[in-house]
Image (spheres, rainbow, N blue to C red):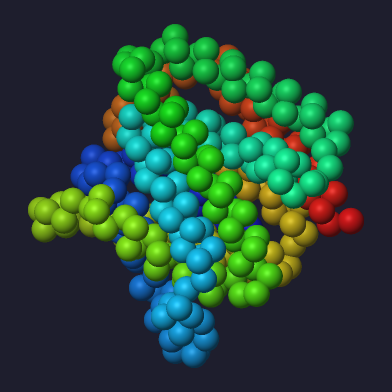
């Protein structure tokens, strides 16, 4: 099940970039939450669990839903302004920030392996950043894209803190229902409603794919948590940018033409791999500590 999540999140930036040819970032982010909420609400309503909480959602659930809504919008904007590979790599700052938040606010310990992993990640991010500076066409848009992705990373950390607190009292699917519902409401001002009425068949197909991606990825992750150690899950999920890089490399190499070429050089790919490797080291060490 966890490989389903890894695969879906790996190809997600590519499908988001495709979807942005038809819809704005706000419209796509809203529809992903709306579709997932609708499907999950119907499922939970049939089995009679969790839906009543929507009438009186906890404050921390509202905060978490708002944070994840901002995360989705920021990530989509970053992909829009740069590309799938760039955003998939830069967003890996989020797990590093989560470790720092754990140390500063939750008094978690940090190990030598984690410090080494952070240093390795910084080197990888720097190499990848240098490659992008050399090859991007519009440096202003690239800088703006990175700011959006970093904004998304920070909001993801806030969401994870809220989710951790909610998990003490509520089930995973109930939490998801609250988060989806709040995000749907929060993102309403950013929706370009005319896009739905003027959308092409391909645009609607991509919207449905993106909605299913959100629903199935989180559903598969919830199932995997019950069967597989968290350490292994976290490591595998952290590797999903490599799927994004591979997918874009294939599209560029075979000149498929559905997306603009990203022009990543060999040292850009090397930087991305190094960055992901450092994050894996940090995440795996953290989970081993927490599981003791």
Q: Is residue 87 above or below residue 41?
A: above
Which residue occupies 30% across, 44% down? Answer: 25
Q: Quadrant of residue 89?
A: top right
Q: Is residue 85 visible?
A: no
Q: Is residue 10 above or below residue 259?
A: below
Q: Quadrant of the C terminus?
A: bottom right
Which residue occupies 62% across, 54% down? Answer: 161
Q: How many marks?
A: 0
Q: Quadrant of residue 13?
A: top left
Q: Whole-percent x and y of residue 224?
A: 66, 64
Q: Quadrant of the N terminus?
A: bottom right
Q: Nearer the viewer, residue 188 or 248?
A: 188
Which residue occupies 74% across, 62% down? Answer: 228
Q: Does residue 222 appear to the left or right of 281 in the view shown?
A: left
Q: Is residue 282 above or below residue 63?
A: above
Which residue occupies 37% across, 55% down? Answer: 210
Q: Whole-percent x and y of residue 222?
A: 61, 66
Q: Is residue 46 visible?
A: yes
Q: Nearer the viewer, residue 70 or 28?
A: 70
Q: Does residue 125 appear to the left or right of 183 in the view shown?
A: right
Q: Is residue 125 above or below residue 80?
A: above
Q: Does residue 281 appear to the left or right of 23 in the view shown?
A: right
Q: Does residue 30 appear to the left or right of 154 in the view shown?
A: left
């Amino acid at each position: 099940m966890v490989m389903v999540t890894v695969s879906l999140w790996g190809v997600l930036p590519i499908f988001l970039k495709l979807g942005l040819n038809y819809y704005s970032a706000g419209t796509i982010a809203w529809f992903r939450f709306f579709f997932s909420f609708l499907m999950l609400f119907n499922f939970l309503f049939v089995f009679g669990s969790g839906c009543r909480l929507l009438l009186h959602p906890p404050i921390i659930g509202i905060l978490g839903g708002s944070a994840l809504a901002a995360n989705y919008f920021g990530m989509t904007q970053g992909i829009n302004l740069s590309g799938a590979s760039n955003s998939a790599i830069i967003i890996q700052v989020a797990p590093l920030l989560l470790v720092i938040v754990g140390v500063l606010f939750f008094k978690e310990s940090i190990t030598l392996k984690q410090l080494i992993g952070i240093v390795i990640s910084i080197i990888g991010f720097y190499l990848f950043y240098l490659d992008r500076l050399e090859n991007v066409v519009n440096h202003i848009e690239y800088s703006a894209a990175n700011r959006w992705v970093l904004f998304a990373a920070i909001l993801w950390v806030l969401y994870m803190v809220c989710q951790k607190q909610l998990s003490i009292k509520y089930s995973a699917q109930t939490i998801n229902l609250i988060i989806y519902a709040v995000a749907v409401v929060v993102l309403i001002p950013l929706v370009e409603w005319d896009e739905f009425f003027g959308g092409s068949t391909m645009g609607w197909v991509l919207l449905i794919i993106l909605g299913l991606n959100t629903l199935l990825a989180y559903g598969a992750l919830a199932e995997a948590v019950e069967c597989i150690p968290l350490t292994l899950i976290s490591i595998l999920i952290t590797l999903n940018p490599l799927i994004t890089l591979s997918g874009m490399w294939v599209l560029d190499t075979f000149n498929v033409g559905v997306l603009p070429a990203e022009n990543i050089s060999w040292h850009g790919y090397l930087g991305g791999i190094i960055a992901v490797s450092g994050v894996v080291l940090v995440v795996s060490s953290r989970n081993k500590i927490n599981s003791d």
